[in-house]
Image (spheres, coloured by chain):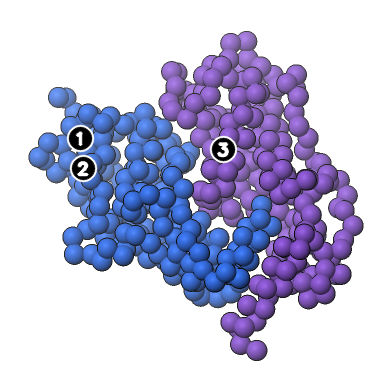
Amino acid sequence: MRRAVLALASLLALAGCASIRLPEPTASIENVSALRNSAIGRAGVSSFSLAAGKSPALDKSVGVRGSTIAPEKGSFSAYLGDSLRSDLRAADKYDADSPTVILGDLVDNQLHAAGASEANALLSVRFRVKRSSDVLYDKVIDQRASWKSSFVGAIAIPDAINHFGEQFRLILLQLYQDPQFQAAMAPRLH
Amino acid sequence: MSRLRLTATFGVMLSVVLMSGCATMFVDTGLKDVTASEYMKPPEPKPVQLLFNFQTKGAANARATKFLTDEVTHAVQSSGLFSSVSTQPVTGGSLLSVVIDNIPVTEDAFSKGFTTGLTFGLAGNTVTDGYVCTVDYSAAAGSQPIQVKTRHAIHTNVGAKKAPEHAVQAKSPEEAVKTMARQIVGNGLKDLSNDPRFLQ
Protein backbone atom coordinates (compact mmCIF):
# COMPACT_ATOMS: atom_id res chain seq x y z
CA MET A 1 0.00 0.00 0.00
CA ARG A 2 2.78 2.41 0.92
CA ARG A 3 4.64 1.68 -2.31
CA ALA A 4 1.60 2.64 -4.34
CA VAL A 5 1.20 5.83 -2.32
CA LEU A 6 4.89 6.64 -2.65
CA ALA A 7 4.79 6.07 -6.40
CA LEU A 8 1.77 8.34 -6.71
CA ALA A 9 3.30 10.99 -4.50
CA SER A 10 6.57 10.79 -6.42
CA LEU A 11 4.73 11.31 -9.68
CA LEU A 12 3.00 14.29 -8.11
CA ALA A 13 6.35 15.66 -7.00
CA LEU A 14 7.70 15.33 -10.51
CA ALA A 15 4.59 16.87 -12.01
CA GLY A 16 4.73 19.79 -9.58
CA CYS A 17 1.20 19.79 -8.18
CA ALA A 18 -2.09 17.93 -8.16
CA SER A 19 -5.70 18.25 -7.12
CA ILE A 20 -6.82 15.54 -4.71
CA ARG A 21 -10.52 14.82 -4.22
CA LEU A 22 -11.98 13.54 -0.96
CA PRO A 23 -14.19 10.55 -1.77
CA GLU A 24 -17.79 10.40 -0.58
CA PRO A 25 -17.98 9.98 3.22
CA THR A 26 -18.47 6.54 4.77
CA ALA A 27 -19.86 5.93 8.24
CA SER A 28 -17.40 4.83 10.91
CA ILE A 29 -18.07 2.47 13.81
CA GLU A 30 -17.10 5.12 16.39
CA ASN A 31 -19.61 7.68 15.11
CA VAL A 32 -22.38 5.15 14.48
CA SER A 33 -21.92 3.63 17.94
CA ALA A 34 -22.09 7.10 19.54
CA LEU A 35 -25.43 7.68 17.80
CA ARG A 36 -26.81 4.16 18.39
CA ASN A 37 -25.92 4.24 22.08
CA SER A 38 -27.50 7.65 22.69
CA ALA A 39 -31.19 8.26 23.25
CA ILE A 40 -31.56 10.77 20.47
CA GLY A 41 -34.53 10.67 18.15
CA ARG A 42 -34.58 10.68 14.38
CA ALA A 43 -33.77 13.88 12.55
CA GLY A 44 -33.31 15.34 9.12
CA VAL A 45 -30.37 17.28 7.73
CA SER A 46 -31.04 20.79 6.49
CA SER A 47 -28.75 23.44 5.06
CA PHE A 48 -24.99 23.10 5.44
CA SER A 49 -23.22 26.12 4.00
CA LEU A 50 -20.49 28.69 4.48
CA ALA A 51 -21.04 31.07 7.40
CA ALA A 52 -21.96 34.62 6.45
CA GLY A 53 -19.03 36.92 5.80
CA LYS A 54 -16.46 34.14 5.38
CA SER A 55 -14.21 33.77 2.36
CA PRO A 56 -15.66 31.34 -0.22
CA ALA A 57 -12.16 29.88 -0.58
CA LEU A 58 -12.56 28.22 2.86
CA ASP A 59 -15.35 26.09 1.45
CA LYS A 60 -13.73 25.07 -1.83
CA SER A 61 -10.22 23.73 -1.26
CA VAL A 62 -7.16 23.73 1.01
CA GLY A 63 -3.53 23.65 -0.05
CA VAL A 64 -0.85 21.16 0.90
CA ARG A 65 2.65 21.71 -0.46
CA GLY A 66 1.59 22.91 -3.90
CA SER A 67 -1.31 20.49 -4.23
CA THR A 68 -4.95 21.08 -3.35
CA ILE A 69 -7.53 18.99 -1.52
CA ALA A 70 -11.18 19.46 -2.47
CA PRO A 71 -14.40 17.51 -1.87
CA GLU A 72 -15.56 15.04 -4.52
CA LYS A 73 -18.50 17.31 -5.30
CA GLY A 74 -19.77 20.69 -4.13
CA SER A 75 -18.21 22.27 -1.08
CA PHE A 76 -16.67 21.25 2.24
CA SER A 77 -19.82 22.41 4.07
CA ALA A 78 -21.93 20.19 1.80
CA TYR A 79 -19.43 17.36 2.41
CA LEU A 80 -19.99 17.77 6.16
CA GLY A 81 -23.76 17.64 5.64
CA ASP A 82 -23.33 14.44 3.60
CA SER A 83 -21.12 12.96 6.34
CA LEU A 84 -23.81 13.71 8.94
CA ARG A 85 -26.51 12.19 6.75
CA SER A 86 -24.36 9.08 6.21
CA ASP A 87 -23.84 8.64 9.99
CA LEU A 88 -27.53 9.16 10.80
CA ARG A 89 -28.62 6.68 8.13
CA ALA A 90 -26.13 4.03 9.29
CA ALA A 91 -27.33 4.47 12.89
CA ASP A 92 -31.01 4.34 11.86
CA LYS A 93 -31.51 7.90 13.14
CA TYR A 94 -32.28 9.63 9.85
CA ASP A 95 -35.74 10.84 8.89
CA ALA A 96 -35.96 13.26 5.99
CA ASP A 97 -39.52 14.20 7.07
CA SER A 98 -38.73 14.81 10.73
CA PRO A 99 -39.66 18.26 12.10
CA THR A 100 -36.28 18.19 13.87
CA VAL A 101 -33.43 19.16 11.58
CA ILE A 102 -29.69 19.77 11.99
CA LEU A 103 -28.01 22.70 10.24
CA GLY A 104 -24.39 23.78 9.96
CA ASP A 105 -22.37 26.85 8.99
CA LEU A 106 -18.69 26.46 8.14
CA VAL A 107 -16.84 29.04 10.21
CA ASP A 108 -13.21 28.06 9.64
CA ASN A 109 -11.25 25.40 7.76
CA GLN A 110 -7.46 25.31 7.80
CA LEU A 111 -4.69 22.87 6.98
CA HIS A 112 -1.02 23.59 7.68
CA ALA A 113 1.29 20.84 6.47
CA ALA A 114 4.30 22.79 5.24
CA GLY A 115 6.34 22.15 8.39
CA ALA A 116 9.11 19.55 8.39
CA SER A 117 8.14 17.95 11.72
CA GLU A 118 4.54 18.82 12.59
CA ALA A 119 1.31 19.56 10.77
CA ASN A 120 -2.06 20.74 12.05
CA ALA A 121 -5.62 21.41 11.00
CA LEU A 122 -8.62 23.33 12.33
CA LEU A 123 -12.27 22.89 11.44
CA SER A 124 -14.85 25.15 13.04
CA VAL A 125 -18.58 24.77 12.51
CA ARG A 126 -21.68 26.41 13.98
CA PHE A 127 -24.23 23.64 14.47
CA ARG A 128 -27.93 24.26 15.09
CA VAL A 129 -30.85 21.98 15.83
CA LYS A 130 -34.24 23.37 14.90
CA ARG A 131 -37.73 22.07 15.42
CA SER A 132 -40.17 24.12 13.37
CA SER A 133 -39.18 27.68 14.29
CA ASP A 134 -37.65 26.76 17.67
CA VAL A 135 -33.86 26.67 17.94
CA LEU A 136 -33.04 23.86 20.38
CA TYR A 137 -29.26 23.92 20.02
CA ASP A 138 -26.81 26.53 18.75
CA LYS A 139 -23.10 26.05 19.31
CA VAL A 140 -19.78 26.54 17.53
CA ILE A 141 -17.57 23.45 17.76
CA ASP A 142 -13.83 23.56 17.01
CA GLN A 143 -12.03 20.41 15.86
CA ARG A 144 -8.25 20.78 16.16
CA ALA A 145 -5.71 18.13 15.19
CA SER A 146 -1.93 17.99 15.02
CA TRP A 147 0.27 15.15 13.86
CA LYS A 148 3.87 14.26 13.19
CA SER A 149 4.84 15.28 9.67
CA SER A 150 7.90 14.89 7.48
CA PHE A 151 10.02 17.08 5.23
CA VAL A 152 9.46 14.42 2.56
CA GLY A 153 6.36 15.32 0.58
CA ALA A 154 5.74 11.68 -0.39
CA ILE A 155 5.09 11.01 3.31
CA ALA A 156 3.67 14.35 4.43
CA ILE A 157 1.05 14.82 1.70
CA PRO A 158 -0.81 11.48 2.10
CA ASP A 159 -0.74 11.93 5.90
CA ALA A 160 -2.17 15.43 5.54
CA ILE A 161 -4.96 14.17 3.24
CA ASN A 162 -5.93 11.47 5.75
CA HIS A 163 -5.88 13.74 8.79
CA PHE A 164 -7.70 16.54 6.98
CA GLY A 165 -10.43 14.14 5.81
CA GLU A 166 -10.82 12.78 9.33
CA GLN A 167 -11.56 16.27 10.67
CA PHE A 168 -15.13 16.02 9.33
CA ARG A 169 -15.76 12.72 11.12
CA LEU A 170 -14.22 13.94 14.37
CA ILE A 171 -16.19 17.20 14.55
CA LEU A 172 -19.39 15.18 14.13
CA LEU A 173 -18.29 12.81 16.89
CA GLN A 174 -17.85 15.84 19.17
CA LEU A 175 -21.38 16.92 18.26
CA TYR A 176 -22.89 13.48 18.97
CA GLN A 177 -21.15 13.30 22.35
CA ASP A 178 -22.26 16.76 23.46
CA PRO A 179 -24.88 16.32 26.25
CA GLN A 180 -26.60 19.54 25.14
CA PHE A 181 -26.96 18.17 21.61
CA GLN A 182 -28.30 14.90 22.99
CA ALA A 183 -30.84 16.80 25.09
CA ALA A 184 -31.91 18.89 22.10
CA MET A 185 -32.29 15.74 20.01
CA ALA A 186 -34.28 13.78 22.60
CA PRO A 187 -37.49 12.33 21.11
CA ARG A 188 -40.52 14.56 21.66
CA LEU A 189 -44.22 13.91 21.44
CA HIS A 190 -45.67 15.35 18.26
CA MET B 1 22.61 21.87 -0.45
CA SER B 2 19.36 23.48 0.73
CA ARG B 3 16.65 21.33 2.35
CA LEU B 4 14.31 22.02 -0.56
CA ARG B 5 16.87 20.88 -3.11
CA LEU B 6 17.71 17.80 -1.01
CA THR B 7 14.03 16.90 -0.85
CA ALA B 8 13.66 17.29 -4.60
CA THR B 9 16.73 15.12 -5.19
CA PHE B 10 15.40 12.41 -2.83
CA GLY B 11 12.02 12.49 -4.58
CA VAL B 12 13.48 12.17 -8.04
CA MET B 13 15.74 9.24 -7.02
CA LEU B 14 12.88 7.48 -5.29
CA SER B 15 10.67 8.04 -8.31
CA VAL B 16 13.27 6.61 -10.65
CA VAL B 17 13.56 3.47 -8.52
CA LEU B 18 9.81 3.05 -8.10
CA MET B 19 8.91 3.74 -11.70
CA SER B 20 11.66 1.64 -13.19
CA GLY B 21 9.92 -1.48 -11.89
CA CYS B 22 12.58 -2.29 -9.28
CA ALA B 23 10.01 -2.67 -6.51
CA THR B 24 8.28 -6.02 -6.00
CA MET B 25 5.57 -6.78 -3.45
CA PHE B 26 5.19 -9.99 -1.42
CA VAL B 27 2.25 -11.04 0.76
CA ASP B 28 3.29 -12.61 4.04
CA THR B 29 2.27 -16.26 4.42
CA GLY B 30 1.55 -15.95 8.15
CA LEU B 31 -2.14 -15.82 7.20
CA LYS B 32 -3.76 -17.84 4.44
CA ASP B 33 -7.13 -17.83 2.72
CA VAL B 34 -9.91 -19.32 4.84
CA THR B 35 -11.94 -22.12 3.30
CA ALA B 36 -15.72 -22.23 3.73
CA SER B 37 -15.52 -25.28 6.01
CA GLU B 38 -13.30 -23.44 8.49
CA TYR B 39 -16.07 -21.06 9.56
CA MET B 40 -18.33 -22.14 12.45
CA LYS B 41 -21.60 -21.19 10.82
CA PRO B 42 -24.67 -20.48 12.98
CA PRO B 43 -27.66 -22.75 12.37
CA GLU B 44 -29.75 -19.76 11.35
CA PRO B 45 -27.60 -16.93 9.97
CA LYS B 46 -29.00 -13.43 10.49
CA PRO B 47 -28.70 -10.28 8.37
CA VAL B 48 -25.92 -7.89 9.33
CA GLN B 49 -25.02 -4.26 8.74
CA LEU B 50 -21.38 -3.89 7.68
CA LEU B 51 -19.24 -0.82 8.32
CA PHE B 52 -15.73 -0.89 6.84
CA ASN B 53 -12.94 1.64 7.32
CA PHE B 54 -9.30 1.56 6.27
CA GLN B 55 -6.87 3.58 8.36
CA THR B 56 -3.26 4.63 7.94
CA LYS B 57 -1.45 4.95 11.25
CA GLY B 58 -4.81 5.30 12.99
CA ALA B 59 -6.17 8.05 10.73
CA ALA B 60 -9.08 7.26 8.42
CA ASN B 61 -7.91 6.78 4.83
CA ALA B 62 -11.02 7.49 2.75
CA ARG B 63 -9.48 6.64 -0.62
CA ALA B 64 -8.17 3.26 0.55
CA THR B 65 -11.55 2.54 2.17
CA LYS B 66 -13.24 3.13 -1.18
CA PHE B 67 -10.65 0.98 -2.98
CA LEU B 68 -11.13 -2.05 -0.68
CA THR B 69 -14.84 -1.87 0.19
CA ASP B 70 -15.96 -4.39 -2.45
CA GLU B 71 -13.22 -6.87 -1.49
CA VAL B 72 -14.12 -6.71 2.21
CA THR B 73 -17.86 -6.91 1.54
CA HIS B 74 -17.32 -9.99 -0.62
CA ALA B 75 -15.20 -11.60 2.11
CA VAL B 76 -18.03 -11.13 4.63
CA GLN B 77 -20.70 -12.36 2.21
CA SER B 78 -18.76 -15.44 1.16
CA SER B 79 -18.07 -16.45 4.78
CA GLY B 80 -21.68 -17.63 5.05
CA LEU B 81 -21.89 -16.35 8.63
CA PHE B 82 -24.72 -13.94 7.78
CA SER B 83 -27.87 -14.29 5.69
CA SER B 84 -27.31 -10.90 4.04
CA VAL B 85 -24.86 -8.00 4.23
CA SER B 86 -25.91 -4.36 3.97
CA THR B 87 -24.44 -0.94 4.64
CA GLN B 88 -27.79 0.13 6.06
CA PRO B 89 -29.38 -0.91 9.39
CA VAL B 90 -30.95 -4.37 9.37
CA THR B 91 -33.83 -6.01 11.22
CA GLY B 92 -32.59 -7.06 14.64
CA GLY B 93 -29.87 -4.38 14.65
CA SER B 94 -26.82 -6.61 14.28
CA LEU B 95 -23.71 -4.63 13.34
CA LEU B 96 -20.33 -5.79 12.06
CA SER B 97 -17.45 -3.33 11.97
CA VAL B 98 -14.22 -4.11 10.12
CA VAL B 99 -11.28 -1.72 10.52
CA ILE B 100 -7.92 -2.37 8.83
CA ASP B 101 -5.09 -0.16 10.07
CA ASN B 102 -1.86 0.13 8.05
CA ILE B 103 0.93 0.54 10.59
CA PRO B 104 4.61 1.10 9.82
CA VAL B 105 6.83 -1.86 10.60
CA THR B 106 9.87 -0.48 8.80
CA GLU B 107 10.11 2.98 10.35
CA ASP B 108 12.93 4.26 8.13
CA ALA B 109 11.33 3.27 4.81
CA PHE B 110 12.29 6.52 3.13
CA SER B 111 15.95 6.22 4.14
CA LYS B 112 16.06 2.70 2.74
CA GLY B 113 14.47 3.85 -0.52
CA PHE B 114 16.96 6.69 -0.71
CA THR B 115 19.94 4.35 -0.29
CA THR B 116 18.56 2.11 -3.01
CA GLY B 117 17.99 5.08 -5.31
CA LEU B 118 21.48 6.42 -4.68
CA THR B 119 23.02 3.13 -5.83
CA PHE B 120 20.63 2.79 -8.79
CA GLY B 121 19.00 -0.26 -7.23
CA LEU B 122 22.17 -2.23 -6.45
CA ALA B 123 21.78 -1.83 -2.70
CA GLY B 124 18.35 -3.41 -2.37
CA ASN B 125 16.15 -3.17 0.68
CA THR B 126 12.96 -4.67 2.03
CA VAL B 127 10.23 -2.47 3.49
CA THR B 128 7.43 -4.08 5.49
CA ASP B 129 3.91 -2.72 5.92
CA GLY B 130 1.95 -4.14 8.85
CA TYR B 131 -1.83 -4.41 8.97
CA VAL B 132 -4.06 -4.87 12.01
CA CYS B 133 -7.67 -5.85 11.38
CA THR B 134 -10.19 -5.25 14.18
CA VAL B 135 -13.55 -6.96 13.83
CA ASP B 136 -16.35 -5.88 16.19
CA TYR B 137 -19.69 -7.64 16.15
CA SER B 138 -22.84 -6.60 18.05
CA ALA B 139 -25.76 -8.99 17.80
CA ALA B 140 -28.22 -6.18 18.55
CA ALA B 141 -28.24 -2.49 19.41
CA GLY B 142 -26.92 -2.06 22.95
CA SER B 143 -25.51 -5.58 23.23
CA GLN B 144 -21.92 -6.21 24.32
CA PRO B 145 -19.74 -6.39 21.19
CA ILE B 146 -17.36 -9.28 20.48
CA GLN B 147 -13.95 -8.09 19.30
CA VAL B 148 -11.20 -10.04 17.51
CA LYS B 149 -7.93 -8.82 16.02
CA THR B 150 -5.77 -10.30 13.26
CA ARG B 151 -2.44 -9.20 11.84
CA HIS B 152 -0.88 -9.39 8.38
CA ALA B 153 2.03 -7.93 6.41
CA ILE B 154 3.12 -6.94 2.92
CA HIS B 155 6.84 -6.83 2.14
CA THR B 156 8.21 -4.65 -0.65
CA ASN B 157 11.62 -5.27 -2.17
CA VAL B 158 13.20 -2.16 -3.62
CA GLY B 159 16.15 -2.73 -5.93
CA ALA B 160 18.19 -5.92 -6.22
CA LYS B 161 17.21 -8.01 -3.22
CA LYS B 162 16.39 -11.67 -2.58
CA ALA B 163 12.70 -12.46 -2.04
CA PRO B 164 11.76 -12.40 1.66
CA GLU B 165 11.17 -15.73 3.37
CA HIS B 166 7.62 -16.76 4.28
CA ALA B 167 6.07 -14.56 1.59
CA VAL B 168 4.45 -15.01 -1.82
CA GLN B 169 5.17 -12.62 -4.68
CA ALA B 170 2.18 -10.65 -5.93
CA LYS B 171 1.65 -9.89 -9.60
CA SER B 172 0.81 -6.26 -8.86
CA PRO B 173 0.42 -3.86 -5.92
CA GLU B 174 -3.35 -4.13 -6.34
CA GLU B 175 -3.24 -7.92 -6.05
CA ALA B 176 -1.02 -7.70 -2.96
CA VAL B 177 -3.34 -5.30 -1.14
CA LYS B 178 -6.53 -7.16 -2.10
CA THR B 179 -5.04 -10.52 -1.09
CA MET B 180 -3.98 -9.07 2.26
CA ALA B 181 -7.50 -7.64 2.80
CA ARG B 182 -9.25 -10.90 1.86
CA GLN B 183 -7.02 -13.00 4.12
CA ILE B 184 -6.96 -10.68 7.14
CA VAL B 185 -10.76 -10.23 7.11
CA GLY B 186 -11.38 -13.94 6.44
CA ASN B 187 -9.22 -14.94 9.40
CA GLY B 188 -10.85 -12.31 11.59
CA LEU B 189 -14.28 -13.71 10.72
CA LYS B 190 -13.06 -17.25 11.39
CA ASP B 191 -11.91 -16.22 14.88
CA LEU B 192 -15.23 -14.43 15.41
CA SER B 193 -17.18 -17.54 14.42
CA ASN B 194 -15.15 -19.61 16.87
CA ASP B 195 -16.18 -17.35 19.78
CA PRO B 196 -18.98 -19.16 21.69
CA ARG B 197 -20.80 -15.84 22.15
CA PHE B 198 -21.21 -15.49 18.39
CA LEU B 199 -23.36 -18.61 18.13
CA GLN B 200 -25.62 -17.66 21.04
Indicate left or right for B74 with A80 as reference: right
* Between discs 1 and 2, the one toward the N terminus: 1
Q: Chain of mark 1?
A: A
> Which lettered chain is shown in blue?
A
**In the rendering, what colour is chain B?**
purple
Q: Chain of mark 2?
A: A
Residue B194 sits above or below residue B71 on the image: above
Secondary structure at badge 2 equals strand
Picture residue at 34% right of the left edge, 51% below the top: A74
Rendered-image quadrant of the C terminus of chain A: top left
Residue A169 sits above or below residue B109 on the image: above
The residue identified by callout 2 is A129
Q: Which mark lies nearer to you, 2 or 3?
A: 3
The residue identified by callout 1 is A100
Where is residue A51? Give x, y as percent: 22, 58
Could you tell me the amino acid type at mark 2?
Val
The residue identified by callout 3 is B69
Q: In terms of image quadrants, where is residue A4?
A: bottom right
Residues tagged 1 and 3 counted as in contact (Cβ below 8 A) = no
Picture residue at 38% right of the left edge, 38% below the top: A86
